[in-house]
Amino acid sequence: MGERRRIRLDRAAYRQGHAFSLTLCTADRAKHLERAELVDVFVPLLRRAADSLCAEVFAYCFMPDHLHLLLRCPAGGDVVEFVRMFKILTTHEGRKVGVPAPLWQRSFYDHALRLEESIEKVARYIWENPVRRGLVSDYRRFPHSGSFVWADWKTM
């Protein structure tokens, strides 16, 4: 077996205060996140991780086998540390309700937003995922999406 391909940017890039679009997939793409009661436990843990690292979570969307996030950590904050903390918190709580470990894939996908990319448009794209997947006809009806930044996110 060859060396594992490096997909992370240099660690310093995650500490520059840029907005990132992230996708965290469950291990083996298991559909654990279909369980509403589990997502209901995970949303406060997402807020806890955000509050702990002063991260702005512009958008989140828990799909059946992955989580989409749009967030920005302040300069000096660390997106990788945010993901690590969130995965630890949710894995611990997931085990309490019978979700086998590992809950998450080892890594995650990221995209640093470019200057010309609108945070609002990327957030809307994230919220529209359940519509594109055929889970709902209107993103505002999907119960596992939201924003910790915009109280009026359903009108965007």
Image (tube, rainbow, N blue to C red):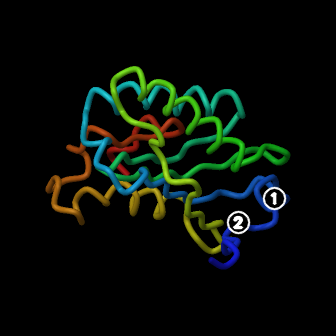
Which residue is depicted at the point 44% across and 46% down?
60
Would you name the residue on which mark 1 appears? 11
Measured from the top left, where is residue 132 in percent x and y? 24, 66
Which residue is depicted at the point 81% across and 66% down?
10
Occupied quadrant, residue 35: top left
**Position of residue 24 in the picture relative to residue 36 (left or right):** right
Measured from the top left, where is residue 26 in percent x and y? 42, 50
As drawn, the label of residue 119 is none
Measured from the top left, where is residue 126 in percent x and y? 40, 58
Up-down relation of residue 110 to residue 36 (above or below): below
CB contact under 8 Å: marks 1 and 2? yes
Which residue is depicted at the point 17% across and 54% down?
135
Which residue is depicted at the point 14% across and 56% down?
137
Q: Which of 44 and 116 lies nearest the eye of the viewer?
A: 44
Q: How would you rate the neighbour count of disc 1 (Cα within 10 Å): few for under 14, some for 14-19, many for 20 or more?
A: few
Occupied quadrant, residue 96: top left
**Position of residue 80 in the picture relative to residue 110 (left or right):** right
Would you name the residue on which mark 2 appears? 8
Q: Is mark 1 on a helix, strand or loop?
A: helix
Measured from the top left, where is residue 99 in percent x and y? 36, 33
